[in-house]
Amino acid sequence: MADTIKCPQCSANLIFNPDTQKLECAFCGGAFNPAELESMPDELKEGKTKAADDSAKAFEGDKDSVFEAEADNAEFTIGEKEAESEDNSDKTEFVCNACGARVVTDSHTSATFCAFCGSPALVGRRLAENFRPKYLIPFSIGREKAENLFIKWAKGGRWTPMNFVSNKNIEKLTGLYVPFWLFDYIIDLNVKGTGTDSSISGNIKTISDYEFKLTGKMVLDNIPLDGETRIDDALMEAIEPFHMDKMIPYDYKYLPGFFADRYDLDAEALKDRAAKRGREYIEQYIQTKVKKYDTFRTTENKSVFNEIRADYALLPVWFMSYKYLGKYYYFAVNGQTGEVAGTLPISPLKKAIFFFVLLAVLSLIVRGVMALIMGGMFG
């Protein structure tokens, strides 16, 4: 059975509205603060018996390994595996408690809609036990604003097909809570390098050589990596950052009205990406410390992963896919900040029109130049 959240006034289904940050009833017009609603679907109660900390995955790296070492050299410990009672098949059937219809969805979807009556449905047991997130960032950008942000961004593409930004395509925009692992790092920095600085006095150029060393502890918090294989990692990184100060303890009452997936990659499966991301941040830190030099070179980096841990969270994203000339294009809008990312399709017609217009302009320019030359010769 799939559960919904009912209106306390009329028992109709409630849907979370990002614009008002309230659960709203389309039937009686009621609006309720999610934190103030006490009702809970029975299937979701199963997940409340497990402490939120059980979803926190902690693992420590080998303190004797250098920062550049492969992630496999680090030792990771992850929590319990998925309970045997969980359904691991690709497709799962649930019964809508609003109309009684049987709806088939994939095994990773935890919040969806009934295809027959349109009611929001929470497949609660899929977010129980190990799959229950510790944190959540609610949607703060509603559908209308997301559509406007996407349209503005898409119109900025010079070669975007003329029929691309249409109501038919915009309707495909889907709100999804994406499963993320939020990584925390404690890194012991140990970096050495050289830098050069130049100055000019009159006709004399002086080049000075320096040595630099960076040591100490570097702390990084809540670096997000998506735990969903069906979602492009680069697309998710392109819509960062998320404002983690707005993150709240997981509350299922923010899900109605949106889709939600559970992870199919745990923190251990992401350890190589996590290590790579950590190296990127330390390189960015080095860049900030050597800006005073004209040139610099890192000669030694013995920085160490002292500690890495990860917590499971759901983050808000608006998605859209578009098929053009047999190829699919994917787009995402950060459901909290409005950042838009994706690769726009290229219209062969627009490129052809531009080519012929450019050819015509160049032809007129050549004719004008030739006329001036010929006029000068016979003038």
Image: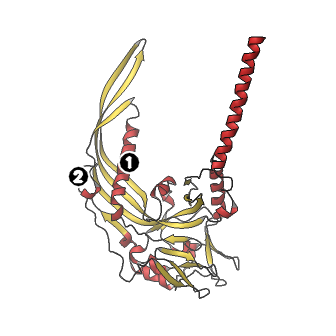
Amino acid type indicated by mark 2: Ser
Location of mark 1 (residue): 280
Residue at image location 59% in from the left, 53% down from the top: 345
Between 283 and 112, the one nearer to me in the picture: 112
Residue at image location 48% in from the left, 81% down from the top: 92
Q: Position of residue 302 (x, y in %)?
A: 25, 45
Residue at image location 49% in from the left, 58% down from the top: 245
Q: Position of residue 180 (x, y in %)?
A: 44, 64
The image shows residue 300, relative to residue 23, as above or below, that is above
Furthest residue in direction left, as rendered: 64
9 left or right, relative to 277: right
Furthest residue in direction bottom, as rendered: 100
Work out whether residue 138 can be spotted. Answer: yes
The image shows residue 66, relative to residue 267, as above or below, that is above
Q: Position of residue 19 (x, y in %)?
A: 64, 64
162 left or right, relative to 328: right
The image shows residue 52, relative to residue 329, as above or below, that is below
Q: CA distance from mark 1 to mark 2?
A: 18 Å
113 left or right, relative to 369: left
SS for dot 2: loop
The image shows residue 244, relative to residue 67, as above or below, that is below
361 left or right, relative to 128: right
Which numbered circle lies on residue 65? 2
Between 187 and 109, the one nearer to me in the picture: 109
